[in-house]
Image (spheres, rainbow, N blue to C red):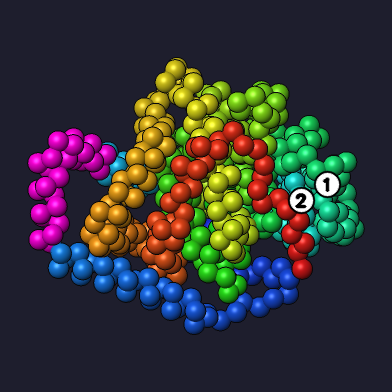
Amino acid sequence: MRSNKIYREQKEDQKVISEKNAEERFNSFDLDNETVKPRNLKGIMVRAASFLLLLGAAYLAFTLQSDFSQYRLERFNSSWGFGFFIVATALFVFKAGFFFYNLFLYLRYKPVQGVEDAKLPTTTVIVPAYNEGKQVWSTLMSLAESDYPAEKLQLLAIDDGSKDDTWSWMLEAKKVLGDRLAIYQQPENKGKRHALYRGFNLGTGEIFVTVDSDSVVAKDTLRNLVSPFVVNEKCGAVAGNIRVLNNEKKALLPKMLDVSFVLSFEFVRSAESSLESVLCTPGALAAYRSEAVFACLPEWINQTFMGNPSDIGEDRAMTNMILKQGYHVLFQRNAYAYTNVPEKYTGLYKMFIRWGRSNVRENLAMAKYVFTDFREGRKLGIRILFVNQILKLIMSYPVILLMFFFVFTHPILFLSSTLLSILIWSSFPVLFYAKRYKLSESLWAYSYSLLYTFGLFWITPYAIATASRRGWLTRELSVKK
């Protein structure tokens, strides 16, 4: 056990090191003996083209002001135009108000600092793996190198019936780590939920930490992730801060997703954490109080939707059930995990469909308790978060129909106004990422917004229509080279 002097020195170091240095910690991972490649010209051209396109659209919208004015006048005087105007205005006011509400909550947010060794609880880390190859070895090594006290840390790795060499890499990790690591092999592929279920039943820690097998963690991640349970007895779960691991490669999608992840975690979840109501703890890195897990474990493993077993959204489902018990769910900005994301459009939309279906299911489940007296203290905040989630689902089909209507009736006005809206609304993610990390990389927010608006707009309506379908979609064999 470290002395108090060493611990105080570590705490001082933590105060000096800002979250911006997470980039440096990320670059220190040399998972496959690869060096970080220089910026590629293609990426620069894509960012520049995206920004110039949006600026051009802004100029076009300015020159078409008379056409916009005439169109608004015609619609306002029509039988349905006034009603549309009222609904659109009400939605805009709500969304704008919700944004500023989130901004206020974000400014109030502060992560819990890591506590000393003596106060840390025993912790079980569960790593389910399926066809991850060598990456699972890197994941386990990063966990073993954590500054969490070894005598309080139990590492479990569970191979969920992989068809590649995942089990071989687990055996290699076992040779290096010895008794610090326990490895298990499922007789057949049953899905991530069942692998985690086995880990929960094998675990002996007061806290469970789940880490995806395609992720690596920083040295202080586990300490920072678990510390909220020490200082807040009502804390039932904690979400980690997820960054993209493979954004140094030539593929463009990981670079876009990294900017999106920073907004989703460091802004949105920071705001939710101020309400003690983070809606989803990510599978890549999350922590749970063991007693909260065991209280809902039978319901969780046997969860169904429309009569079919649920084999997706295990992280959102666990979060929902813990919130329902009255626990707080928090976010730790200083607990970093770096995870691999899809590099191609096919993998991306499949991932989003899976997330979308889970979102539909869990919002319906949340509706059953969120307006009840499910926990002590304030509940208005989480209800506002829920209403925002439901509005996104309700408005998805009307928005799609209106979009197609305007595309066919006024294509130029639609295109210019849509691109102008992207320029305006995407500027906040750009500024946020630039302040937190790099200005040059922040411009990917514009490219991502263009991709989502024109290439992924169909995800939510499709996820709603197919919410009862099963399947991971991206669990096909993907041997790591």
Q: Residues within 10 Å of mark 2 (few under 14, many from 20)?
A: many
Q: Is residue 294 left or right of residue 323?
A: right
Horizontal side of 122 relative to 306 (left or right) equals: right
Q: Residue at x 66, y 78 (%)?
A: 35
Q: Position of residue 87 (x, y in %)?
A: 23, 36
Residue 18 visible here: no
Q: Main secondary structure of the magenta part?
A: helix
Residue 194 falls in which quadrant of the image? top right
- The answer to whether residue 280 is magenta is no
Q: Is residue 70 magenta?
A: yes
**Disc 1 secondary structure class:** loop
- The residue that label 2 is drawn on is 130
Q: Position of residue 162 (x, y in %)?
A: 82, 51
- What residue do we see at 55% from left, 46% from top? 353
Residue drawn at x 52%, y 80% as measured from the top left: 39
The residue labelled by disc 1 is 161
What are the residue bounds of the magenta stretch? 65-93
Disc 2 secondary structure class:
loop
Picture quadrant of residue 391 = top left
Q: Determine the residue located farthest toward the top in the rendered image.
A: 373
**Quadrant holding the C terminus:** bottom right
- Circles 1 and 2 in contact, beta carbons < 8 Å: yes
Distance from label 1 to label 2 (Cα)?
7 Å
Name which residue type carries label 1: Gly
